[in-house]
Every structure is written in C-alpha cells, then in structure tokens.
Image (tube, rainbow, N blue to C red):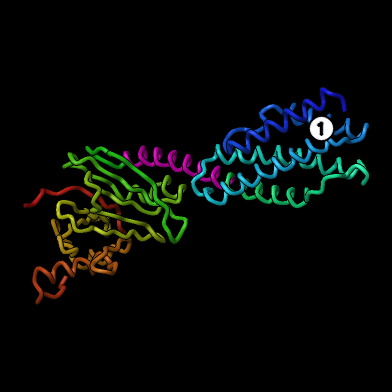
C-alpha cells in the first residue's frame, strides 16, 4: 500500500472516530460514495501487496469505530423508535448500509489475505447479521409510515370530495368542516359534518346523501351532524337498505320523514327531547300509513324501532292510556325553533 492509500485509510478512521466521539446520530456518515470506493481500493492494494502492522492497526480501529456507530444507532432505535420521524430513520438506514458495505469489504479481505496476514479477529458475520436485522426493522417501519401518509392523503382527498357531495343535499346551509372516520369494527366509513351555528334554516336531505352513488362507491355508511360547539345532535347510517337514525337530545333539531303509500305522499317530523326520548313535531299519519314505511328505524332508548313503533312511544308519552287505532321516499333534517 502506498502512502496516499494509507493516508486515505487514516482519513476514514478519523471520520469514524469523530462520529463516535460526538455521537453524530442523524448526520449521513458517508454522503460521498467515493469514500467507500477509496476504502475498497486500499483493500485491493493490501490484497496485492500484503498487509503491514500500520495498515492492520488502521483497519482494526476502523472496524471498532463502525461497531460503535452501529451500537449507537441500535441504542437510539431501541429507545426512541416510536418517536423517530421518517427522515431520521432514513439517515440511520443509510448509515447502516455504509457500515455494512465497509464491514463486508473487511470480511472479504480477511478470507483472501490468508491466515499469515489475519492479525485481527472480529466477528464480522455477527455484525453483518445484526445490521441486516436492524435494517429490516427500519424498512418495515418506513413502509408503514409511507402507507399511513398515503392513507392520510387519500382520507383528505375523500373528505374534500365528501364535503362537495354533501353540499348538494343542503338547502340554505353551509358546512363549517367535514372529516371521515372509520368504524372500529368494520371497513365502513362515516362522515362527521360540522355546521356553522348561524344555519337556522338548514334543510339537509340526509336519505339522498346516504343512498347516493358517492356513498356506495366510497363505502360511506353513515353520518354524524354536529353544531359549532362540537356537540352531536343527529346521526344516521344505512345497513342492508335500512336507514337508522338517532335524533339525539338536542331539542332544536328534528327529522322530517317523507314516503309514499299508493301514490299518496305521507310525512311526519320527529324531534328529540332532552331525556333522549322522541316527540312528534308535525304531521300525524295514520298507523296504517306509518306501517308502510319499512325503510327507516329510529333509536328510542337503547333500541332501534320501526317508524310506526317509534311514533307509538311518542303517543304513549303524550297519553299513556291511549292505544293505537290507527315505500319510504326520503328524510330531511332541519333545525327547529330554539326553546328556552
């Protein structure tokens, strides 16, 4: 090995020692690939001309330094991997790749120099295995991060489209914000719509939204309407063609149900009481007409009842001694006059 090549080895050794001394965890160790190429050339020279004591000492120091850098990266990973961002993980991965290349070069040089020249004894194979194992972990985390970023981007795009789509079903109203939530027990999605507080005459065609091609194509099965103070007041979902509604406990909102019986339009508007029961606000179809609506269920207490059975609970509250003597089109949600 000539003096220039020996000098390159010393430069590499010094760089590695500095990185160890200052624990430079998040800086790229070998930004220039030529540094590893020069190291490989030095090893090629050793293969041709043999290894001397000085060269051997430099290689020993380089190997020890690389092993220390690996230990530092491994410790940082074990202690902080939950909080490391993608950029820091990428730097770790790149530095491990550089260490792996140099250690492989050292390992190869030992097998080719012959036993007479092997004056240092390290477990390169063990270090290589540890590096590759740690790289595999990092790669899996990076891939998961990438998937999450892509999922977040798709979610944001879907939220923007959902906001535009839902706007088609609002009369005289404005959406303040909209988000998408995935059901914890299925792959179904729900839209969370926040309305501006000044929407006192908002008329929302909720059934048309739930039955829209947009919801079907994007696996959106329900909605939750909230006011400006983020309190839930009405929610709905669709399952196997049946629309399920929870009117909530906010008394100023209600749902108007419209359906047809033998060509005749029927309607009834239901609202909430503060105790989570429901009340009839306007229109009182006959029980026979109510029974014809098979497409809607209303949450009363802990159960979802048919429209007819839900209305019975309203009448029983109005007159506990009363008995009932008497294909869905759409439902509209609209605010009612505020009560004191």
Please say if 148 is above or below 239.
above
- Measured as percent of width and height from the top left, residue 120 is found at 82, 45
Please say if 251 is above or below 37.
below
- For this orientation, the residue located farthest to the front is 53
Left or right side of 72 for 209: left
- Dominant secondary structure of the magenta stretch? helix
Please say if 91 is above or below 193.
above
Observer-nearest residue: 71 or 211?
71
Q: Which residues are magenta?
A: 143-167
**Residue at 19% over, 63% down:** 276
Q: Secondary structure at mark 1?
A: helix
**Residue at 22% over, 54% down:** 255
Observer-nearest residue: 113 or 218?
113
- For this orientation, the residue located farthest to the top is 4
- Measured as percent of width and height from the top left, residue 35 is found at 74, 28
Residue 65 appears in which quarter of the rendering?
top right
* Residue located beneath label 1 in the image: 40
Left or right side of 195 for 73: right
- Measured as percent of width and height from the top left, residue 108 is found at 85, 42
**Residue at 31% over, 55% down:** 236
């Amino acid at each position: 090995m000539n003096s220039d090549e020996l000098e390159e080895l010393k430069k590499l050794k010094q760089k590695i020692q500095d990185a160890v001394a200052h624990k430079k965890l998040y800086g790229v160790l070998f930004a220039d690939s030529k540094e590893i190429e020069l190291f490989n050339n030095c090893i090629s020279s050793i293969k041709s001309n043999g290894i001397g004591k000085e060269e051997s000492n430099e290689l020993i120091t380089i190997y020890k330094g690389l092993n220390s850098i690996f230990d530092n990266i491994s410790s940082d990973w074990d202690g902080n991997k939950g909080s490391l961002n993608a950029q820091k993980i990428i730097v770790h991965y790149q530095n491990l790749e550089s260490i792996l290349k140099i250690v492989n070069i050292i390992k190869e040089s030992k097998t080719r120099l012959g036993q007479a020249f092997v004056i240092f004894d390290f477990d390169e194979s063990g270090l290589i295995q540890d590096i590759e194992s740690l790289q595999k972990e990092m790669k899996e985390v990076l891939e998961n991060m990438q998937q999450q970023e892509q999922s977040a981007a798709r979610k944001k795009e879907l939220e923007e489209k959902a906001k535009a789509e839902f706007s088609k079903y609002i009369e005289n109203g404005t959406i303040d914000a909209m988000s998408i939530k995935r059901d914890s027990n299925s792959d179904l999605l729900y839209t969370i719509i926040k309305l501006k507080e000044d929407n006192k005459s908002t008329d929302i065609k909720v059934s048309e939204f739930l039955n829209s091609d947009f919801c079907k194509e994007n696996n959106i099965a329900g909605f939750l309407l909230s006011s400006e103070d983020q309190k839930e007041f009405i929610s709905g979902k669709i399952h196997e063609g049946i629309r399920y509604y929870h009117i909530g406990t906010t008394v100023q909102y209600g749902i108007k149900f419209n359906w047809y019986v033998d060509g005749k339009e029927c309607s009834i508007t239901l609202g909430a009481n503060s105790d989570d029961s429901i009340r009839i606000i306007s229109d009182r179809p006959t029980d026979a007409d109510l029974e014809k609506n098979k497409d809607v269920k209303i949450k009363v207490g802990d159960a979802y009842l048919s429209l007819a059975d839900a209305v019975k609970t309203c009448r029983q509250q109005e007159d506990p001694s009363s008995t009932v003597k008497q294909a869905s089109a759409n439902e509209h949600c609209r605010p009612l006059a505020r009560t004191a």
